[in-house]
Amino acid sequence: MSVHAQSTPNPNALKFVVAGALFVRPLSFPSAAAAAANPLAARLFALDGVYNVFMAQDFVTVNKRPDVAWDSLAPLIAQIIEDGFTQINL
């Protein structure tokens, strides 16, 4: 599965687009505690700097703290999303 990042008007948010509709309804996780029951969201919150995750249709938007660079974080997020859906589709 291919995952690619798109910028958003918010410099602390990236939209990670995947092929096809994956989410039946929007899911919003404003904290790690709220994400605990969702394996994908929980793995994203385990990354240092992630503070919000939103999933809808064919994308996952991740917000990070301003002091964390996308250079190191974005590839990890993309890999977690790709791995998460690869495991689901096995």
Image (cartoon, rainbow, N blue to C red):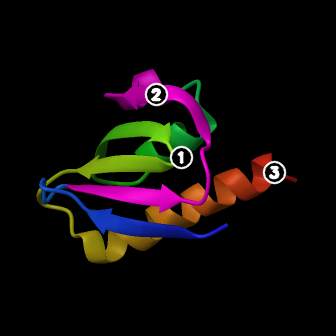
In the rendered structure, find residue 43 and report the number of the disc placed on it.
1
Q: Residue 43: say if magenta.
A: no
Q: Nearer the viewer, mark 1 or mark 2?
A: 2
Residue 70 higher or lower than 46, as above or below: below
What residue is disc 2 on? 27
Indicate yes or no whether the magenta region holds residue 32. yes
* Magenta highlight range: 13-35
Q: Secondary structure at mark 3?
A: loop
Sequence-earlier tag: 1 or 2: 2
The amino acid sitting under disc 1 is: Arg
Disc nearer the start of the sequence (3/2): 2
Screen quadrant of the N terminus: bottom right
Camera-side residue of 49 and 10: 10
Tell how many labels. 3
Residue 89 - label: 3
Q: Secondary structure at mark 1?
A: helix
Image coords of residue 78 (percent x, y) = 49, 65
**Mark-to-mark CA distance, 3 and 2:** 19 Å
Measuring from the top left, give residue 74's x and y in whole percent: 37, 68
Q: Residues within 10 Å of mark 1 (few under 14, many from 20)?
A: some
Q: Amino acid at mark 2?
A: Leu
